[in-house]
Image (cartoon, grey):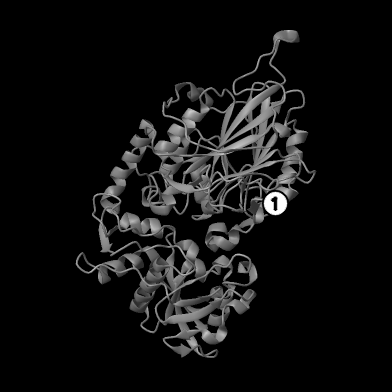
């Protein structure tokens, strides 16, 4: 149901906030216009006019981040770095992320800002490292409570374990299967999850609150939260069973009107959908050569169509960084932001509230992304929280399960790690059915690379269970299905056609399956049919092939509708166990696994 809040119950804790003393971080801001109206500042304004009341304009600080994915500890490898553009045009990388540092940065940013809100753009949990994922993300919810998050939209990964589990994360209670992990009952999120466009299929009502209103004295800011309409295509069918996902723009516009009828004219949309920036540097100028020219993709179209009644958009999903002013349908500048992922950045946006109109003075909105650098003191309360959960996870996570001779990365159209996982699933599947011919793995199910350098005390080249869990955290099963050769070819063509035509999803393939991907062509023709071979033999359209894949793909996920039409389904153990068994059986300290060559798909550009 719609919700308003005259005062968030946690605001009284702000007076006890840790005050970090570290130096600031180099950032570049985006400014929609040169001058602020009046004399608004970060603190509360009191004028000397009639009645000695507050001044007309009040700056409201909006701190935001997105796609944390349970990364409480500093993420490793490329997942734990950001690229920064230097004044001379060169770039440098900065180690970033970690909840202990994010807490310090946010608390420092709030200093001196009497009117401060912290919001998020979804995917706070899901696809999480073992420290959080092993405990169904209760540690991350506890951390977000300590970060004093005020509100967040729901991301697609919040549905990984279904609507009932999302409700538990919101409202608290012990896990229905695993029970309580400590002597204290899990209390749930102190902040509201918003899901305006996710409806119960039967009641047609929003699954969770569609909006929430932040209030302080006479200042009111409304937040509408939506997730991407295409969530059912990228989440397991069981996770979204009984739910309907509506159009983001139509939903936001609907509730913007409702908020204005209730007297709330300052509105921020929290959208779990994103775009693709012109640069991978977090601080590039997104408004060069013109407003919003540095961003493309779904969010650009969404931003241009959302009602002018909405004053700013906090976005996510694509894990990219941008701060842009995309014009609204009336041609007015409107800030659209995203803070990359994994807690590596946060966005600081100033919204200048006009007390006379109750609206945001759009010409004064300014925003910048800031690095969550690791050169500041760790927040002690976050260190204690991580330590508590690490103590519980350590006996499981620190166990060595294999050895590698170098980094096995997930990057690339075909990746070494993708090949390794497909090989692992094929080997496991053949223990269930020796006639299994091949395995396919979706790239989105591979969440991190395996790094040679030790992440703890295990030693270089040692793969721990925790590291493998971070790679494959979804608890999918390995499924076997039978397809005709014609269906197999069609499935491969679905990588680059249909819903995947604009943004191809290239399946990772097991040893023995080869083909050519011709990127100079368009649509399904990019998969060259005559080139597809299995162990050197052409695919016979009328023959039967036994294929292993995870349960997400077996349900037709990621737009692979043909993979949801297989016969003789056999469900095995979870995919992480398949990877663990493969690493253990095929590697040792003296004979580690070499990174696969990633040469099964021939790419023509």
Q: Is residue 201 visible?
A: no
In the rendered image, the quadrant that contains the N terminus is top right
Q: Is residue 3 left or right of residue 380?
A: right
Q: Residue furthest front?
A: 88
Above/below status of 150 relative to 398:
above
Residue 267, by quadrant, is top right
Q: What SS does tag 1 mark? A: helix
The residue singled out by tag 1 in the image is: 302
Q: Is residue 406 visible?
A: yes
Residue found 24% across the figure and 53% down from its top: 458
Question: In the image shown, does 369 or 83 lie closer to the viewer?
Answer: 83
In the rendered image, the quadrant that contains the C terminus is bottom right
Q: Residues within 10 Å of mark 1 (few under 14, many from 20)?
A: many
Q: Residue furthest left?
A: 590
How far from the left and from the top, in percent, is residue 492? 54, 77
Residue found 50% across the figure and 42% down from its top: 345
């Amino acid at each position: 149901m719609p919700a308003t809040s005259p005062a968030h119950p946690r605001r009284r804790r702000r007076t006890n906030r840790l005050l970090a003393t570290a130096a600031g971080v180099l950032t570049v801001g985006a400014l929609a216009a040169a001058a602020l109206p009046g004399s608004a500042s970060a603190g509360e304004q009191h004028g000397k006019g009639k009645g000695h009341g507050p001044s007309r304009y009040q700056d409201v600080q909006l701190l935001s981040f997105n796609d944390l994915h349970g990364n409480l500890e500093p993420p490793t490898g490329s997942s734990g770095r950001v690229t920064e553009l230097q004044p001379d045009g060169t770039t440098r990388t900065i180690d970033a992320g970690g909840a202990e540092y994010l807490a310090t940065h946010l608390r420092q940013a709030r200093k001196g800002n009497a009117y401060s809100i912290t919001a998020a753009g979804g995917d706070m949990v899901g696809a999480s490292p073992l420290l959080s994922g092993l405990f169904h993300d209760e540690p991350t919810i506890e951390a977000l409570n300590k970060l004093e998050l005020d509100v967040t939209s729901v991301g697609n990964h919040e549905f990984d374990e279904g609507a009932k589990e999302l409700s538990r994360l919101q409202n608290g209670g012990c896990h229905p299967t695993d029970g309580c992990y400590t002597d204290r009952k899990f209390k749930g999120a102190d902040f509201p999850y918003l899901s305006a466009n996710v409806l119960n299929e039967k009641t047609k009502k929003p699954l969770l609150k569609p909006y929430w209103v932040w209030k302080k004295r006479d200042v009111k800011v409304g937040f509408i939260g939506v997730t991407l309409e295409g969530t059912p295509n990228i989440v397991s069918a069981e996770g979204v069973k009984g739910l309907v996902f509506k159009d983001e723009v139509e939903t936001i516009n609907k509730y913007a009107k409702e908020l204005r009828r209730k007297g709330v004219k300052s509105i921020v949309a929290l959208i779990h959908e994103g775009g693709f920036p012109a640069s991978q540097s977090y601080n590039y100028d997104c408004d060069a050569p013109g407003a919003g020219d540095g961003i493309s993709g779904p969010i650009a179209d969404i931003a241009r169509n959302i009602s002018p009644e909405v004053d700013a958009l906090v976005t996510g999903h694509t894990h990219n960084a941008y701060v842009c002013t995309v014009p609204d349908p009336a041609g007015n500048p409107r800030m659209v932001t995203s803070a990359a992922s994994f807690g590596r950045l946060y966005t600081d946006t100033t919204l200048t509230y006009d007390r006379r109109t109750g609206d945001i003075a759009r010409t004064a909105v300014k925003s910048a992304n800031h690095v969550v650098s690791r050169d500041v003191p760790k927040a002690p309360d976050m260190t204690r929280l991580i330590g508590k959960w690490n103590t519980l996870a350590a006996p499981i996570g620190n166990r060595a399960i294999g050895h590698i001779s170098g980094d096995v990365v997930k990057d690339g159209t075909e990746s070494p790690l993708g090949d390794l996982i497909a090989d692992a699933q094929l080997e496991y599947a053949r223990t269930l059915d020796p006639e299994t011919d091949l395995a396919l793995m979706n790239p989105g199910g591979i969440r991190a690379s395996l790094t040679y350098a030790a992440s703890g005390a295990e030693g270089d080249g040692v793969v721990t269970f925790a590291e493998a869990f971070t790679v494959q955290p979804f608890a999918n099963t390995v499924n076997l299905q039978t397809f005709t050769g014609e269906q197999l070819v069609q499935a491969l063509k679905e990588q680059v056609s249909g819903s995947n035509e604009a943004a191809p999803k290239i399946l990772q393939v097991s040893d023995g399956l080869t083909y050519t991907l011709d990127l100079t062509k368009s649509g399904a023709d990019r998969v060259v049919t005559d080139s597809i071979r299995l162990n050197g033999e052409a695919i016979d359209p009328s023959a039967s092939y036994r294929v292993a894949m995870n349960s997400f793909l077996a349900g037709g996920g990621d737009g692979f509708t043909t993979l949801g039409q297989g016969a003789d389904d056999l469900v095995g153990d979870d995919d992480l166990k398949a990877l663990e068994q493969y690493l253990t059986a095929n590697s040792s300290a003296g004979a580690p696994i070499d990174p696969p060559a990633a040469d099964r798909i021939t790419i023509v550009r």
